[in-house]
Amino acid sequence: MTATETRTQATEIQDWIVEIRRRLHRHPELMYEEVETSKLVRETLDGLGIEYRSPIAKTGVLGWLGDGDGPCVALRADMDALPIHEETDVDFRSEVDGKMHACGHDCHTAMLLGAARLLKERESEIHGTVKLLFQPAEEGGAGGKLMSEEGVLEDPAVERIFGLHVWPELETGQAGSRPGTFLAASSSLTMTVAGKGGHAAMPHLAVDPVHAAAQIITSLQGIVSREADPLNSGVVSITAVHGGEASNVIPPEVQLRGTVRALTMDNLVWIQQRVIDIAAGVAAAHRCEATTQFPGNDYPPTVNDPATWDFARNLAGRMLGDERIEELAPVMGGEDFAYYTERVPGCFVALGIADEQKGTGISVHHPKFKVDEDALPLGTALHVQFAMEMLEELR
Ligand code: NI
């Protein structure tokens, strides 16, 4: 089936895909709590007559289709939401205070279920295996790592993997990515700056961690701007500062949180070490003590296999129009799709969702983030076409 025919088929089930997406959107669940989401995925696969394994990676689902006689291609969606309180005007907005699908993972799951439905209709043409990866905990929980550790890439061995992310920087009908490193290596940081509390009117009797923390925050910005090669991208962002309760009390300690990013693991590790050293040194200069930790998972960079991106770019061009496919610059956002592309050639593709009239160009992780749902069947069609053509290619 041609890319255009697949697009038409996907558009015919747009309402079905959108309905699933909206159900997920109303009931966002955070990392490793995707219980209802996982149930909806399983029920939908049951309804389609698609086999699956679950639980996997706690709340994940691994579905599969095909006759098993040939190569194996995987398609991936993530399912988790963010701890953000939704502020959009949509009538299917989140019904859970403080939780929101602000990164579009509801769309990713719905698009892959759409693909599952279309692939089931053509299962007799699938010579080999298409695996459907519905993973938990992309937002910092390294669900992709756990899925991989629990064997989703084996038995049969996945030879290529494809993933999509809704992308407000591209218009609906566009798609983009790049060969090589597309998304950054990332890690979260926490820091405690400890001093000695006391009366704010008598700073000489205390050791002020607020003052030290302020100096640390400023000094950390010298890592990227003064120490790193300007052509070697990195980010250090301090995003949370907590300390003190009263206007006349010097608190005993201050807690900082933030994130560091780089385009290679080596550079990430180097930045982490500089954060530790600078924080300790600056704190010491102010008679305080700083302890830094990187408590989460250090996500590797998401590196696209150049040939696989070429392949996806070509089929996306036939589906959407060559002029609508963009070669994007690397982005400092992190993505745990990286854990799959570390082991299997694959590509991660940005799917445009921006439409000025609909107000859908707002960045992900924003409380007003919205999606142009006309993009969803395009994502479904890209999944399907990638799987079908790649199986053919690998035979
Ligand atoms: Ni995301």
Image: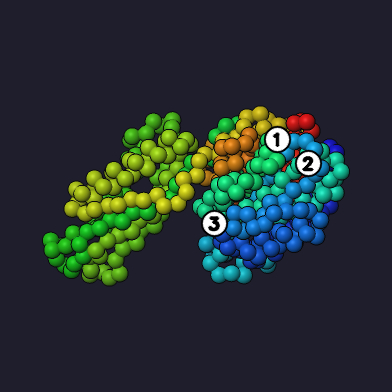
Instruction: Give the alpha-carbon distance from disc 2 to disc 3, as whole Å.
Output: 42 Å
Where is mark 1, residue-wise?
312
- Relative to 346, residue 95 above or below: below
Task: Give the residue displayed 59% in from the left and 58% down from the top.
Answer: 58
Where is mark 2, residue-wise?
68
- Residue 276 vs residue 166: left or right? left
Quarter that holds the C terminus: top right
- Relative to 336, residue 23 above or below: below
Q: Earlier in the sequence, mark 2 or mark 3?
A: 2
What is the residue that sits farthest to the front in this orientation? 155
- Check mark 3 vs ligand 1: CB closer than 8 Å? yes or no: no
Task: Give the residue displayed 71% in from the left and 31% down from the top.
Answer: 311
Of labels 3 and 1, the one closer to you = 1
Q: Position of residue 189 (x, y in %)?
A: 39, 51
Q: Check disc 1: other Cα within 10 Å, few if <14, some if 14-19, many if 20+.
A: many
Of labels 2 and 3, the one closer to you = 2
- Check mark 1 vs ligand 1: CB closer than 8 Å? yes or no: no
Q: Of helix, strand and loop, which one carries label 3? A: loop
> Please, what is the three-letter code of the amino acid marked with disc 3?
His
Count the labels in the image.
3
> Please, what is the three-letter code of the amino acid marked with disc 2?
Gly
Q: Quadrant of residue 28?
A: bottom right
Asked which colour scheme the image uses, the reply is: rainbow
> Please, what is the three-letter code of the amino acid marked with disc 1?
Ala
Q: Of helix, strand and loop, which one carries label 2? A: loop
Where is mark 3, residue-wise?
366
Q: Check disc 3: other Cα within 10 Å, few if <14, some if 14-19, many if 20+.
A: some
- Residue 308 vs residue 377: left or right? left
Task: Give the residue displayed 85% in from the left and 40% down from the top.
Answer: 125
Q: Position of residue 389 (x, y in %)?
A: 78, 35
Q: Earlier in the sequence, mark 2 or mark 1?
A: 2
Q: Position of residue 71 (x, y in %)?
A: 75, 36
